[in-house]
Image: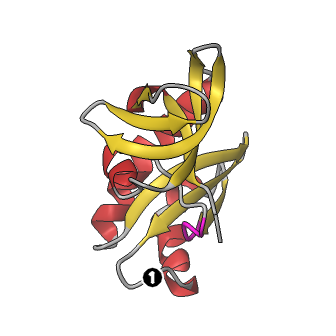
Amino acid sequence: MTTIYARERTLQEEIAPTVEERLPGVEVLAVELLSPSRFCVYVDHPDGVDHALCESVTEALGGYLGDFTVEVSSPGPERPLRKREHFASAVGRRVAIRTGRELEGRKRFRGEVLAAGENAVTLAVSGAEPLDIRYDSIVRGNLIDEG
């Protein structure tokens, strides 16, 4: 796995508990590095994500503002998927997944989520047998906007 994705995981592990503890109901879906000094935090809330919530998340991450430009975003139609729970809610939907290492000769996959098991998501890939992709090998996963 590249340094970028390892850094994203570290940021995710630091940021999610901070935000989720300070702002009840907020879920940090993903943290993505946009440049070495800029990251985006994708959040969701049962009541939706508005400007005020994004501002509150930014304030909760004030300690990062000296080293990073922090962006906060709603998940949007191409919702980030990183955890088993995210993939479980996407069963029957088409997704795009990028892995940190090659599986069957490639790192990028598109297909329908068939199942979200304990350790891996099962993906129906066009022209191939269903493929199990371990969650710990996924560096990016998103719903595909079919609207």
Task: Please give the residue where the numbered disc 1 appears in the rendered image.
Answer: 48
Find residue 123 and report its horizontal and vertical position in percent. 46, 37
Q: Splitting the image into 4 quarters, where does residue 97 fall? A: top right
Find residue 37 and report its horizontal and vertical position in percent. 72, 45
- Residue ranking furthest to the right: 35
**Which region shows up in magenta?**
73-77
- The image's colour scheme reads secondary structure
Please name whichever residue, 106 or 7, is drawn nearer the observer in this view of the structure: 106
What secondary structure prevails in the magenta region? Answer: loop
Please name whichever residue, 143 or 18, is drawn nearer the observer in this view of the structure: 143
Quarter of the rendering occupied by the N terminus: top right
Find residue 119 and report its horizontal and vertical position in percent. 29, 30
In this orientation, does residue 82 appear?
no
Q: Amino acid at mark 1?
A: Gly
Q: Residue at x 64, y 13 (%)?
A: 105
Quarter of the rendering occupied by the C terminus: bottom right
In this orientation, does residue 79 appear?
yes
Number of callouts: 1
Q: Residue at x 48, y 25 (%)?
A: 129
Q: Splitting the image into 4 quarters, where does residue 130 fall? A: top left
**Is the residue marked by circle 1 packed among few (<14), some (14-19), or many (20+) residues within 10 Å?**
few
Q: Residue at x 39, y 44 (%)?
A: 114
Q: Secondary structure at mark 1?
A: loop
- Residue ranking furthest to the front: 127
Q: Residue at x 50, y 61 (%)?
A: 61
